[in-house]
Amino acid sequence: MKRILLFAVSLLFAVSNQQFANAATVSAWTLDPVDNFRNASWSFGQKFTVGSQNIAVTSLGAFDANGDGFVSNGGIPVGIFRESDGALLASTTVTSGDTLDGHFRFADISELMLMANTEYRVVAVNLDDLYNIATSNWTVDPAITLGDYGYCNTSTLTRCDGFTGSDYIWMANFKFGERDVQVSEPASLALLGFGLLGLGLIRRKRD
């Protein structure tokens, strides 16, 4: 009986996890770059708020102006900070060998859960690479809401507000999927079936 129930629960989790694995991830934003700049090294941070559903970040991205890789030695540092306490939740270095999607390259990270109705900041340091100031030529996925930006002159990945403003996308990006996955009806029926089978076996054993 215990083995049957354990198998049923394992099947349920497997189906649920498979559903999420098959769900497509999307970029937080896309842009059509017009004005690119290189005048120093800056830690650019873009604030955003997650909507009504949790999201799972699967990769972090950095702006590749010409789609031909980065000139900065070692790549571009990128991280996600929680705004309420400034905690760095995840970080990586995006390199020229990482996947190019649109005008950003993305490096995979361990799945990072971002909670609904919570504000975060994704930050990237341009180092020796071009960055972009997008005033109107961008789109944001409806699962998140864009907030203000904050940045400062540094070569270190840091959450800073030397300069602030609103609704600009600078250097960083990320990919995510919605994490509130509903278990499919076949999986629920399978679990119910195994439960009934287990009850039947118990009854037979008692008889």
Image (cartoon, rainbow, N blue to C red):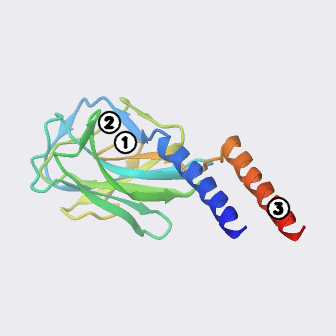
Please state which amino acid type lies under the numbered disc 2: Ala
Q: Residue at x 71, y 53 (%)?
A: 191
Number of other residues with Cα within 10 Å of mark 1, as a class: few under 14, some 14 to 19, many 20 or more: many
Q: Which residue is mark 3?
A: 199
Please state which amino acid type lies under the numbered disc 3: Leu
Q: Residue at x 47, y 50 (%)?
A: 48
Query: Who comes first in sequence, dot 2 or dot 3?
Result: 2
- Extreme-right residue of the structure: 207
Q: Which mark is residue 155?
A: none
* Left or right: residue 27 compared with residue 69: right
Query: Who comes first in sequence, dot 1 or dot 3?
Result: 1
Residue 176 at x, y = what percent?
45, 46
Considering depth in this image, is 116 or 148 the residue closer to the camera? 116
Considering depth in this image, is 170 or 70 the residue closer to the camera? 70
Query: Is residue 29 visible from the viewing direction of this image?
Result: yes
**Disc 3 secondary structure class:** helix
Quadrant of res 1: bottom right
Q: Which residue is mark 1?
A: 168
Q: Which mark is residue 134?
A: 2
Please state which amino acid type lies under the numbered disc 1: Tyr
Residue 193 at x, y = what percent?
76, 50
**Disc 2 secondary structure class:** loop
Q: Disc 2 to disc 3, how far (Cα)?
A: 62 Å
Q: Disc 1 to disc 3, how far (Cα)?
A: 60 Å
Residue 159 at x, y = what percent?
34, 63
